[in-house]
Image: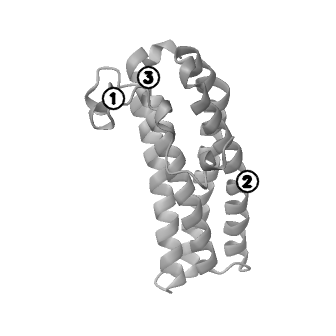
Amino acid sequence: MNNDLDLAQRTGLPDALHALREAYPRGSWETHENFDGLVAFWMERHMMFRQLCAHLREDAEAASDKRLPKAQHDSRLMRFGSMLLQQLHGHHQIEDHHYFPKLVGLEARLARGFEILDRDHHAMDGLLERFGSAANGVLQGTVEPGAFRDEVGGFETLLLRHLEDEEDLIVPILLKHGSDRIG
């Protein structure tokens, strides 16, 4: 696979993988008859991941600037960090083993996009491990909040890229075919 399709390098999916974008533009998703149910749930999960990353980054910034006491930062880091790690890992497993194969069956011409997303998930496994190690380091006092802030910021950038690309590929398929087809 090309380096420009690597999660850390790309700025979006190739145009060929946006075959349904014109028929299902992002701005119209929430009003589509097939949005409620699985699509709405999927988007809510993605919003949760975005919010957790934002909370973790903002808390790390506040702790680094001494605006958030260590005990409060540690408590929030344990809560939000473990939630992010657990939920994102489970979310990716369900996608890889259940949803992606079924979605490829509905739109085989977009299979390359699912290969890219699967590759992202493997890359994110390492990122999640690194994030977890850095978070544990903060809690143990071996990693400074500023270093953790940088770790969270880098992780957040890659996660946001992945979530946007995943939505751009998957949501139009679900809107076109309906979520009952992948049950």
Name the colour scheme.
one colour
* Secondary element type, mark 1: loop
Three-letter amino acid code at the position of disc 3: Leu
Left or right of 119? Residue 41 is left
Crowdedness near tag 3: few (<14), some (14–19) or many (≥20) residues, C-alpha within 10 Å: some
Give percent across and percent down for residue 116: 62, 38
Asked whether disc 2 touches disc 1, contact meaning CB atoms under 8 Å apart, the reply is no
Provide the residue designation for mark 2: 126
* Front residue of 55 and 169: 169
In this picture, is 149 found above or below 43?
A: below
Give percent across and percent down for residue 152: 58, 65
* Front residue of 97 and 112: 112
Return the disc, 2 or 3, that comes first in the chain's sequence: 2
Provide the residue designation for mark 1: 22
Provide the residue designation for mark 3: 174
Crowdedness near tag 2: few (<14), some (14–19) or many (≥20) residues, C-alpha within 10 Å: few
Task: Identify the image quadrant of the N terminus.
Answer: top right
